[in-house]
Amino acid sequence: MPTSKSSTISTGKLVALAIGIGLLLVVSLIMGDVYIPVGEVFSIITGNGEVDSTSEMIVLKLRLPRIILALVIGAGLGAAGAGYQGMFRNPLADPFVIGASSGAALGAAIAIILNWGETVYGWGAIPISAMGGALLAVGIVYGIASVGGRVPTVSLLLAGIAVSSIFSSIVALIMFLNNEKLVTITSWLMGSLTGSNWDIVWPSAFIISCCTLLLWFFSRGLDVLTFGEESAAALGFQMNRIRLIVILLATLMTATAVAAGGIIGFIGLLAPHGARMLFGALHARVIPASALIGGGLLLLADDVSRSVVESGELPVGVICALLGSPFFLYLLKTRQYSLDAEAGG
Amino acid sequence: MQNFQRSRLQFQQQFILCFGLALLLFQLVGCAESVSNEEKTSEQTPVIPGYPLTITDDLERQVTFDSPPQRIISLSPSNTELICSLGLEERMVGVTTLCDYPPAVQDVEKVGDFNANSISLEEIVALKPDLIISGSGFHRDLVTNLERLNLNVVAVEPKQLEQIYERLELLGKICNVNEAADKLVSSLKERVERVRREAEEVKPTPPLKVFYQIWNDPLSSTGNVSFIGEMLTTIQVENIFADLNTGYSPINEEALLIKNPDIILVPMYHGGEKDREAILSRESWQNIKAIKNNRVHFLPDDEVSRHGPRFVDGLEAIFKACYPEASLE
């Protein structure tokens, strides 16, 4: 149990984190292909004073929705990662590694090919289809990798890789057979926040904030899951139900993030680790902190992707992979001992 | 009673006064409105016949123009060539980094490259265009994004030679340069017809068998339902991969050896002489007639691959490569 002193420290850190994200947000609003003076950006945001209508359009219709979407998607991936890691009791679980992203990609690719977004169910079709694919992938990975309620790292990684490859190759096949939509799917697979607009931001923000909040309500249950199920059973928690709910929530968030921004890896891995380093292992803190850190990280990565190339941008998914993969390898290396311990016990 | 009547009278007077005032106010507002209307119309003068103009583009979208566009952005090299061939270089305010023809556009602002993701929406908005010419399929999402920003986008992506004429006429109509478009189209048609007639005269029987190498790795060619396929049909040679059902697709090298083409045509991409050496030295190809008879011909790249007005130059180059002894006067 945290003492009052440590919770004051946590609050301080949380405030610092929020301020950091706030600053990042301001910087993101100012930077862009077209130079708009800081004062004008401020006037546009606050709605005071005379502003140029072109600048207003750039800030309010291009930059702001993109920034908010980066925060929302990053938060969703971060919180989903925290959920997966707690539930799988494995520090390497993240939406990308365990196959949820590839599953969502397949679901969304099918929806794009069949024009569901345009013809059948409106905007909801792609996320729902992505959700279905993600659930299927995670279900298969979990089913294969779990041994008596535990999910050893090695089997999780292997199952995740194998299932991801299967799903990715089906996506590749779909792309091959549908030349026309190749560009759409490719740019989407690389992960990009280009063309973000309020129509995408609102539903994504709604789903992700609801799921994060719900996941947060289950943080006590997640703590119990993480500490071990034997004690959980003794404490009278209905572990299977909690596990199912956590999987559903984390996967729904992943699918929403994938549907809105394409495949963006490693945010779900980095954010919860950062959160635990700063705020300790209790999920009541890890989940909101993961969301904040994830949002900040993705916004930062998107700013990098916007500014690296003059007039144009790198896919943000590529930036995240470049940032995230070394960290993943570092975790794999430094956790060698615990892997051995796991394999032994 | 008297009091009542007086007050009634007062009421009537007041009512009339109020009504009068309201009427006056209404008229004033009306006047103000009509004044502002007059101002608006005077801004739009001179009224151009034919506008507002509504057209349908290559994504089956309806786009309306109130007046001929004056600030044009083109998002692909072939569209840049189409627009400029109508004498509209002056109106170009944005192109891509790949747009290098005509030379005049090299100084125009660049908004991105070929990849739809590289195109900067911010820069496009800042250029305040009144017409953006995009591609169709590969720009579909971009078009949606530009539409959301209330920008006038027209998708232009001709897929057959005939469609180049139609798109030129469409752009001429949009930009109110119908005459230039008609003139250009008839001269293009004339040149194509001349090539066709000349080929009719000089073609051997059976016709020459031609392999058109679209790309070397993977080895690709094209069927008859494509620009190149149409050009080969026009000069009346036999495209050995005529039955490839998609426009451009990978081919089987063994099939190439068996079909044994008389001529190999290769667009000169950036490789130049290296391409030539690479093709002539392919061991498995040494028995192909085209290699043995030194009939591997290189074609100017942009003219044959861009779906713009210079396709006729490409067509004439293909004609000269296949019938070196013939002339087009």
Image (spheres, rainbow, N blue to C red):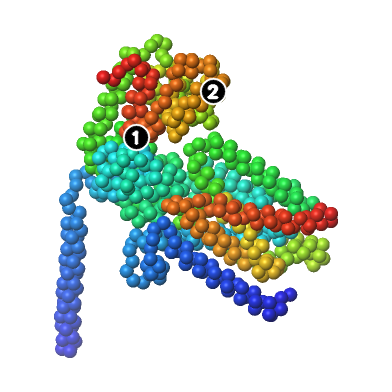
Crowding around mark 2 (Cα neighbors within 10 Å: few <14, some 14 to 19, many 20+) is few
Give the left or right position of residue A7, taking residue A298 as reference: right
In the picture, the quarter occupied by the N terminus of chain A is: bottom right
Q: Nearer the viewer, residue B272 or B239?
A: B272
Secondary structure type for disc 2: loop
| Observer able to see residue B308 | yes
**Residue name at image x 16 percent, y 51 percent:** B46
Give the left or right position of residue B272, taking residue A157 as reference: left
- In the drawing, what numbered circle is on residue A173? none
**Residue name at image x 32 percent, y 54 percent:** B128
Crowding around mark 1 (Cα neighbors within 10 Å: few <14, some 14 to 19, many 20+) is many
Disc 1 is attached to a residue of which chain?
B
- Residue A50's x, y, as percent? 32, 69
Give the left or right position of residue A282, taking residue A172 as reference: right
- Residue B66's x, y, as percent? 25, 49
- In the drawing, what numbered circle is on residue B282? 2
| Tag 2: amino acid | Arg
- In the drawing, what numbered circle is on residue B308? 1
